[in-house]
Image (cartoon, grey):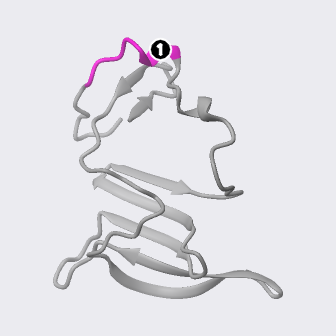
Amino acid sequence: MFQIDQKTKDCSKIGLTEAWDPFDIPANSTFEDQYIIGGPGDNVEVQEWSDRKPARQHETWVGVYTLKDCYPVQETYVRNSSVTTSTRFFNLQLGISDPDVFTPPSTCQSARPERMSESGC
């Protein structure tokens, strides 16, 4: 995974702690809620899942998926108290229309892995 500093435009590599598939709710997930997003006559029913376990206060992952076909709507990952990643999914299409979107910017080719500080980015 790559992180781009918005101020300096510097790119650095960040190792993923575990494999992530936005189209797969992990088997050990906890059902949190089911609700409707949208308005009258134009809405979608969704379910919210997390990695929360009994007696734990904080989740590190929360995912919202459509009830029909389990399409991702939003996923949030909390690495620590100052680093949270939130991804929203919209205009989903089957297949990959432009595989070049997976090519990192040229500045990332020479980036070296570095550990993020606890104080944030």
Residue at 50 percent of width and 20 percent of height? 9
Amino acid type at image mark 1: Thr
The percent coordinates of residue 59 (x first, y second) are 29, 69
User: Is residue 108 covered in magenta?
Assistant: yes
Side of 28 relative to 106 (left or right): left
Residue placed under numbered mark 1 in the picture = 107
Residue at 29 percent of width and 72 percent of height? 51
Q: Nearer the viewer, residue 30 or 118?
A: 30
**Residue 31 versus residue 25 in the image, above or below:** below
Mark 1 Cα shell of 10 Å, populated few (<14), some (14-19), many (≥20): few
Q: Secondary structure at mark 1?
A: helix
Side of 48 relative to 68 (left or right): left
Residue at 26 percent of width and 75 percent of height? 28
Residue at 47 percent of width and 55 percent of height? 86
**Which image quarter holds the N terminus?**
top left
Q: Nearer the viewer, residue 25 or 89?
A: 25
Classify residue 46 by image quadrant. Answer: bottom right
- Predominant secondary structure in magenta? loop
Classify residue 113 by image quadrant. Answer: top left
Please report the bounds of the magenta region as a residue range: 106-113
Q: Nearer the viewer, residue 115 or 26?
A: 26
